[in-house]
Amino acid sequence: MTPTGDAPGGTLSATPSARYIRDVAARAGTRSSALRSPSQIPTRALVDPDVPGRLRTTRIPLLEPSPAVPGGFVPKAFVGEVVPFRVVSFREGHDRIGVHVRLTSPSGEESLHRLALRNDGTDVWSTDIALDVQGSWLFRFEAFSDDFATWAHAAALKIAAGVDVPVMAALGADLLSRAAGEKDRPAAQRKRLLADAVAMRDGDGAAALAVAADAALAQIFSDRPVTTLRSATPERVLAVDRVAAGVGAWYEFFPRSEGARRSKDGSVKSGTLRTAAKRLPEVAAMGFDVAYLVPIHPIGTTNRKGRNNTLVADAADPGSPYAIGAAEGGHDAIHPDLGTAQDFRAFVRAARKEGLEVALDLALQASPDHPWVTEHPEWFTTLPDGTIAYAENPPKKYQDIYPLNFDNDPEGISAEMLRVVQHWVAQGVKIFRVDNPHTKPLQFWEWLIATVNAADPDVIFLAEAFTRPAVMRALAAVGFQQSYSYFTWRNTKAELEEFLTSVSQETSDYMRPNLFVNTHDILTEYLQFGGRAAYRIRACIAATAGPVYGVYAGYELFENVARPGSEENIDNEKYEYKVRDWNGAEARGDSLAPLLRRLNGIRAAHPALRQLRNFSAHWSDDDAVLVYSKHLDSAFTGTGKADTIIVVANVDPHSVRETTVHLDTTQWNVPLGASFEVEDLLTGAVWTWSDHNYVRLDAFAEPVHILKVRERS
């Protein structure tokens, strides 16, 4: 199979399919008939080309429209996400303007939404809209002279001052007569407008003043303004993904460890997909949505790593599942110890029965024993001595892995990667956690994700890219629906405030952070030395600060011992089986599972926690006490009631902190200084709070408050 579209390496010669061009054109807001070759596929849809004589401004300027993505890529949302639509607009002089956003749904239905002007002198107009249908939406901003608002404002000032009273009354009458003459206005409305026009012509200034102050009349013109000037932006595209792209709780585990059995001689027999399926009800009972599996493919034996990443493996060592490929097959095969393709499909069905989706690791690399090595040596880097280069992340070297080289045969590699993804989609996998995508060409991911999503828009790709900010953001911009982030290493109050504000506001139009608390590769110093309090604190923040988060199996058991000199667990599961006593630990009260269960229950019950863009940092007098809120207006909750959660966390896992927290309560429509009740969703305690409140947080007993703001009577 030959991929179509722009070449990942810039040398792909195949002609792009019409379907691919249509897809890219739709995402860029360009008609496919105007695209005749790959070079014409637009990549900067938000910037007009330089054309002599073309003016970049409209009569009423519309600037900085958002949602938007740097570079002109398509912004993202998910079904049910509350999206802020914003634009800067103004006109010369003192005349009033209005701004609308016109939305076109994937089915072609149009709706018009009026934006409100911020009262801060920035000329920013905005409105929040929840998009309820998956697919490509179109939107454009429209500005217009608001003739009624301009007249009403001038009339109120002039008539009250006795200036130009007859003139203002006549102008108002003409305006209302013009509106009444619009045949498609409702008859009752036209009748009322005409009567008011007559009253102004025949009366004194009092009648005109009454019309100018009439709120009902102002609403009529707000719903359908009378205007003499209009401006509009070009149409833009907003890609709305399914809910799972933006909301979910992930649970990562190694299938070979689930059901693994230790013999009397100390050897361990691998678990299987069938035994791993028995763990799924417990994962679902904790409230997780996604069961994420590390690679399940055959593992190479050449240079196989032993326990704790040693260079020499014993015969019983299973090797790293990231050293993919052996005589039994490659990326489309299943490790014989785990079972068969039929067993995998049974696992997927079992997960669905429990309300779980299966996510599969997509690690585009090969062991020295992978069939690709002999069939396609050009896909790898050959050194001067004739050997193939190992994967490296200096000073780390992975002698059991060969990285792919996209320079020699981008067509062949692209076609094979597309085939692999399509194979697993056919097995029921719709979510892929992509290992180290920043080590592959950006253009390749743009092409692959667009191609896969053109055929199946439900497929979700998560970028595991702990890399430089520009690279991480670029991967999200070109199509990745979710992204790992720096959350794992943001631990202080100041770090968390900056990070969470950034991902919820600065990059939220295109980058969705998955707030993993740990991974099989990452055991931070905070967790290593913070004890059990650190595990509780990080889980509470991850589960409430963003709508997507994840944990790696063993987190419940507080596995916090690192391999010396590293950020990895000692006896790392990447290189051996883990036999864990899940039920025994919980029975002994030695498990975090009850807290995870409670946190996921809170997330399910509170729609404010299933949004990304509504994070707001507040203040405390203590440098270790983090305070933030998540608020959702009643129009978006589906219950008719607003939903507000306040989180107060002691991020120092070694201390007891007493301080005062300071809240901007106006964010959930409570006046400053007014009292309201809060309920701690972890303990059930109820307090009366206001905008300044004393708190005491004991890291060893109760390090975090998750507070629900009760409705005021």
Image (spheres, rainbow, N blue to C red):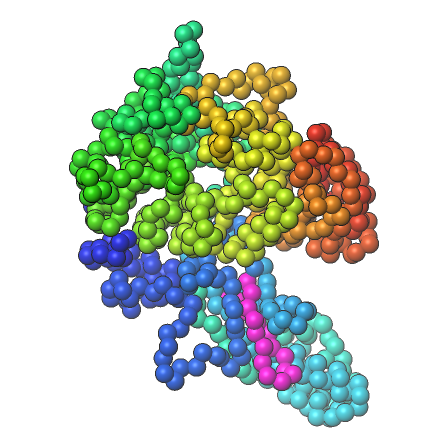
Q: Is residue 330 left or right of residue 255?
A: left
Image point (72%, 72%), residue name: 215
Residue 57 screen position, x and y as percent: 48, 79
The percent position of residue 490, horizontal first and vertical second, equals: 57, 44
- The answer to whether residue 468 is seen in the rendering is yes
Question: Residue 26 appears in which quarter of the rendering?
Answer: bottom left
Residue 479 vs residue 422: left or right? right
Residue drawn at x 42%, y 21% is 577
Position of 618 relative to 429 (above/below): below
Q: Residue at horizontal 78%, vertical 40%?
A: 658
Q: Is residue 87 magenta?
A: yes
Q: Write the residue at 50% across / 77% down.
A: 231
Does residue 104 appear in the picture of this structure?
Answer: no
Q: Is residue 138 above or below residue 322?
A: below
Residue reaching furthest to the left = 375
Q: In front here: 675 or 478?
A: 478
Q: Quadrant of the N terminus?
A: top left
Q: Please report the bounds of the magenta region as a residue range.
A: 85-102
